[in-house]
Amino acid sequence: MCQEFSMRVIARVRSDFSSKFGVPRQSGLVESLESTLVFEPEFRNEAALRGLEGFSHLWLVWVFHRAARRGWSPTVRPPRLGGNARMGVFATRSPFRPNPIALSAVELAGIEHTPQWGAVLRLRGADLVDGTPVLDIKPYLPYADCISGALGGFAAAPAGEALEVVIPAALLGRVPADRREALRAVLAQDPRPHYQEDPERVYGFGFAGMEVRFSVADGVLTVREILEDRR
């Protein structure tokens, strides 16, 4: 029997990413990334956060709102396998699923009280686009959620080695000082699709109100331009 359940968005994430391109492929890969979780007006009740300050990390249950589509496929092409091999959708973290939901473990950097939004959560290491709808928040429990000896299948380790990143001083000066470390770390993760290796191609993505354009050749990522993000 097929059942359907309706769910409400309880919060949205405010992050530095205006598009999917450039977002780390998993949470925690770039620990210096900072974002803010803002509750929807209906859920701005500080009583719901009582005791949360005692946890260092959280699970976010959220929606792939930029990838929602009708129908589904039993197999997908994981980028880390070059975009050629097919795997079962339930053996991957692809956004193209029967239900477009995701799960991310993030660091809780603090709970801040703001005049505009009430209590907000300051996060680190999130892999979410700006505006991502959040369905639920659960505390991360080290004794239960960290499983010793767990196997990672074909995704047992982070994909590839970090790139060397070159940002000319004149361009780096356009980046706010508190965003430079995070930007370098995001670029070092190699935002390109794994199957693209054209050294002449220039890529771009939105980050912290900027459009960052770069190319990659011989393991070195070079930032070519940093412009105002008009998206």
Image (cartoon, helix red, strand yellow):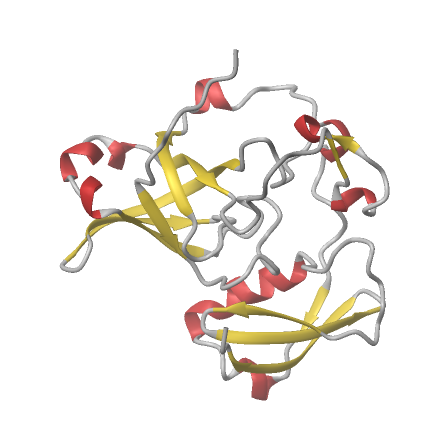
Image x and y of residue 21, in percent: 61, 60
The answer to whether residue 36 is left or right of residue 205 is left
Along the line of sight, the residue nearer the viewer: 86 or 205: 86
Q: Position of residue 25 (x, y in %)?
A: 62, 48
Name the quadrant containing residue 80: top right
192, above or below 132, in the image: below
The mark total stands at 0
User: What x and y, as percent, mark residue 61?
Assistant: 43, 35
Residue at x-position 69% and y-position 74%? 214
Classify residue 118 as left or right of residue 28. left
Instruction: Please identify the quarter of the rendering in which residue 186 is found.
Output: bottom right
Q: Position of residue 216 (x, y in %)?
A: 78, 70
Spot the residue most to the top: 1
- Tell me if residue 183 comes above or below residue 167 in the rendering: above
The residue drawn where x is 44% and y is 57% is 130
Residue appearing at x 71%, y 37% in the figure: 157
Quadrant assignment, res 193? bottom right
Q: Is residue 154 above or below residue 107?
A: above
Q: Residue at x 73, y 61 (%)?
A: 163
Residue farthest bottom in this picture? 170
